[in-house]
Amino acid sequence: MKRVMKIIFVVVTLGVMGWAFFEQTKEQPNVWIQIVAVILFFAAMSRLTRRTASNSTIESPAEREFNTGIKKDLIELDKEDQKDAK
């Protein structure tokens, strides 16, 4: 049932958006159709971004501080040690 509702939502959203684009060609476009189309578009984008995984990971403040400061210093020290070893 959920799958059918998703398909109906997509079809209705695309239909209303097409109708809103068609309304733009008229001399007196119906503003309410355009408003509904924008609302449906934002709802569809919200549903899409909810399903998309985020690239960022949740870090504690201590992890952020380590990654921004201390970690860089340790990497630079390691590079210097490697240069000295050569």
Image (spheres, rainbow, N blue to C red):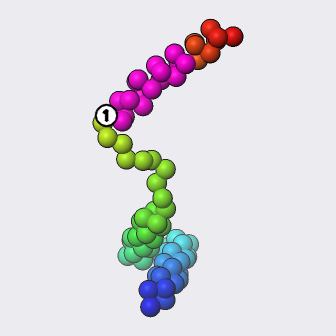
* Furthest residue in direction front, as rendered: 85
Q: Which residue is at 46% across, 66% downward?
A: 51
Residue 78 seen: yes
Q: Residue furthest right?
A: 86
Asked if residue 45 can be seen in this view, the reply is no
Q: Amino acid at mark 1?
A: Ala
Vertical position of residue 82 compared to residue 5: above or below: above
**SS majority, magenta:** helix
- Residue 29, horizontal then vertical, whole percent: 46, 74
Instruction: Specify whether residue 22 is painted magenta.
Output: no
On the image, the x and y values in percent for residue 49 come to 46, 62
Pinpoint residue 7: horizontal percent, then vertical percent.
Answer: 51, 84
Q: Which residue is mark 1?
A: 62
Left or right side of 23 for 65: left
Provide the residue span drawn in magenta: 63-78
Q: Callout 1: 10 Å neighbours few (<14), some, many (20+)?
A: few
Q: Is residue 64 magenta?
A: yes
**Quarter of the image where the N terminus is located:** bottom left
Label 1, secondary structure: give it. helix
Which residue occupies 35% across, 30% down? 65
Residue 50 in the image, given as x and y percentages of width and height: 42, 64
